[in-house]
Amino acid sequence: MEPLRVAIFGESYLPYLSGVTVATEALARGLGAAGQRVMLVAPRPARAAGESSAGAIGPDPVYGWLPSYQGPPPAPPDYRMPWPVPSAAVRRARGFRPHVVHAQSPFVSGLMARRVARSVGAPLVFTHHTRFADYRHYLGPLAAPGAAGVAAYLRAFWTGCDAVVAPSGDLADEIEAALRDRRRGKRPIVRAIPTGLELAALRSLTPIDPRLEAGWPSDSIVAVSVGRLAREKNVEVLLEAVAAAARYVGSLRLLLVGDGPLRGRVEQRARGADLAGRVHLAGRLPRLEALALAAGASCFCFASLTETQGLVLAEALALGLPVVALDGPGVADTVRDGVDGTVVGAGPGAGDRLAGALVEVAADAGLRAARSRAALEGSERFAMGARIGEMLDLYRTLLASGQRRR
């Protein structure tokens, strides 16, 4: 079968680490490993080296670097955003003559992707990575009108695509429901295709014992959480849950891997009498180093309510970590409640329920071992090859239909 030429447009990229940038690299290198030709158009990194990797396996794509700038606060360091100007990268993408154009954002780079798709007559695919409304608290008094405006914009952008990919089933259902409300125009195909994992690479990691780094006793039960220290990640609820659980399991400790705007508040709370000496902040780490450190923990904690997939949950299970999580978006697609993890209800009292689940897992070594085995045995469902195959099937379905947005 003839290789496809796929142009991928990203709004952010490595070396900034996030679920979106990891997923973008995984798609680009995964398609290349499957024998396709890939061009990646993304904001030029600040670092002179340009190209970097978060550990995805596959050949380097052809890069087209967009003129970029450092995002304003609260954007973290290394978060580069593209200038909305004509550039050599976009001209190069047109010259690449892609069979498919795949946008990873609906904003600046997404609009560039749409223009390129239309100019070469290629179908436009969009992966909806982020629940933008969950970040409206950064807009202050403009939160409500800003969220409404973004929702309307997203519906219009989806309608202009040939296909919309959602990383979880519940998000796909939400997008389908929103599109049904638009009575005019042809609706895009909507598919749930989660980001895949390079399982062999994860299984080859040598675990790093966080007890040594934190100065904890060797028999400590370490719960780990990996992600930004930010309001939308619900980190403060996680801290309270660990404090409550530690009253029953004295050996419980919490490892936080990541950084963010709430670091100061987290540090202050961690100095409280009920958490003092129990919380270690490892800061931002390269992805594989962060996962190796997580692999040395006893279980994985997840309190975020703003995910489209929660890629880190799949990573944790692939490392053999039992999961304790709030029932937020995307969680049910990944964690098998009662098999490889415990999923508790969100909403009022969520912290207490999370604490109870932590006590159950932390106090029972046999339960942890059984769920660890189940996680490892079931992790094949996250395999990169299967996910890339699903994406290629979508691309070929669109090409076979011969329909394009104009």
Image: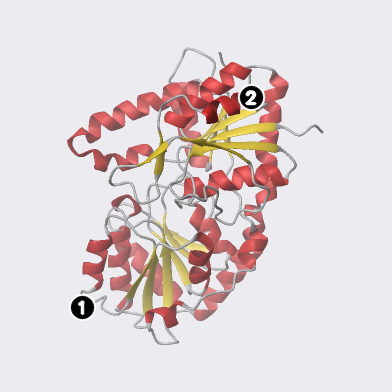
Number of numbered discs present? 2
Q: Quadrant of residue 242?
A: bottom left
The answer to which quarter of the image holds residue 360 is bottom left
Rendering coords of residue 113 (x, y %): 53, 27
> Which amino acid does the dot numbered 2 rest on?
Gly
Residue 95's label in the rendered image is: 2
Name the foreground residue: 112 vs 318: 112
Quadrant containing the N terminus in the rendered view: top right
Instruction: Please name the residue that numbered disc 1 is placed on.
Output: 273
Position in image of residue 32 (x %, y %): 69, 43
Nearest the eye: 233 or 280: 280
Left or right: residue 201 compared with residue 304 = right
Label 2: how many Cα within 10 Å (few below 14, some 14–19, many 20+): few
Amino acid type at image mark 1: Ala
Vertical side of 354 occupied by 169: above or below: above
Considering the numbered disc 1 on the image, is that residue within a helix, a strand or a loop? loop
- Residue 167 in the image, given as x and y percentages of width and height: 53, 42
Asked whether residue 235 appears in the rendered view, the answer is yes
| Residue farthest to the left, as pictured | 141
Q: For the point 50% across and 60% down, which residue is it? A: 287
